[in-house]
Amino acid sequence: MPWLTAREERVWRLFAAVLFLLPEEVEAQLQRDAGLTQFGYGVLSRLSEAPARAMRMTDLASMAHGSQSRLSHQVASLERRGWVRRERAAEDGRGSVAVLTDAGYAKVAAIAPGHVAAVRSAVFDALSPRQLDELEGICTALLQSKIREELGDGPASSRQALAGGHRGHLEDDADSSGACPHDEDIRASVETQAGEDLSAGLARISDARSAVDFTELQLIDRARAQGQTWEQIAAALGMPDRRQAQTRFRRLRERWPEYVPMSAASR
């Protein structure tokens, strides 16, 4: 594999700076005004645009560019703030639907103007109409292989393409192999910025705890699927007996009712 040319290296470093600095600038406004990450705002925004302000969790994960596990952590946080609630899907009773509450809609309406101003300042004010066209073409080219991959990986109803007028799914759903909590979630939970609202900091700590709990749910399920006994799982968790391990798993299942165990022994 050849090394990058001098020009490629220069462009890559510029692009990497854009990926790091611009999202940080935009998210700083969301943190300051609402104690939200960009992902959290994206979830609220997409629900506000959906019919009846509701969307299946699987579809919402796709539209918000996140895995189902990450979305579940985020929705749990938004539920605690009273901005979202989860309901069983009315059509078939399977899976969950996220619903934007009136308080959540009011929150989106309140913070959207500031968010738009931050995005415009960070990106569009610096570009001419021609450069905007060029940026659109560049983004489409860079994402094209991912769009094709997603179109060929599942039913069209859950894999909506950018070309079809919708924002595509850009991050694979977390499998049940026990993925660790998203690095961004952990960083946002343990690092507080100067002048940050205390309630926002506490909410992010709660998000991190939720992420760890969901990962524990996945790992216990995986252990059962691999044939480990409840006694072995209890020992791994530092619990004295199988009953405590089973109770812990049952309580985790109750927190995430939409989670489908990979092991029949866990159901």
Image: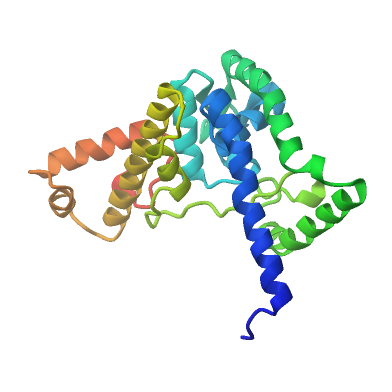
**Residue drawn at the location 56% of the way across and 46% of the way down:** 66
Q: 8 or 219: which is nearer to us?
A: 8
Which colour assignment does the render follow?
rainbow
**Residue drawn at the location 60% of the way across and 18% of the way down:** 107
Q: Position of residue 89 (x, y in %)?
A: 55, 29
Residue lying farthest to the left in this orientation? 240
Residue 176, image quadrant: bottom left
Q: 219 or 118: which is nearer to us?
A: 118
Residue lying farthest to the front in this orientation? 194
Q: 188 or 223: which is nearer to us?
A: 188
Q: Is residue 206 above or below residue 229?
A: above
Q: 112 or 14: which is nearer to us?
A: 14
Q: Is residue 218 left or right of residue 33?
A: left
Q: Position of residue 29 (x, y in %)?
A: 60, 31
Q: Position of residue 232 (x, y in %)?
A: 15, 55
Quadrant (top left/top right/bottom left/bottom right) for the C terminus: top left
**Residue drawn at the location 42% of the way across and 22% of the way down:** 199
Image mark count: 0
**Residue drawn at the location 74% of the way across and 37% of the way down:** 121
Q: Position of residue 81 (x, y in %)?
A: 47, 20
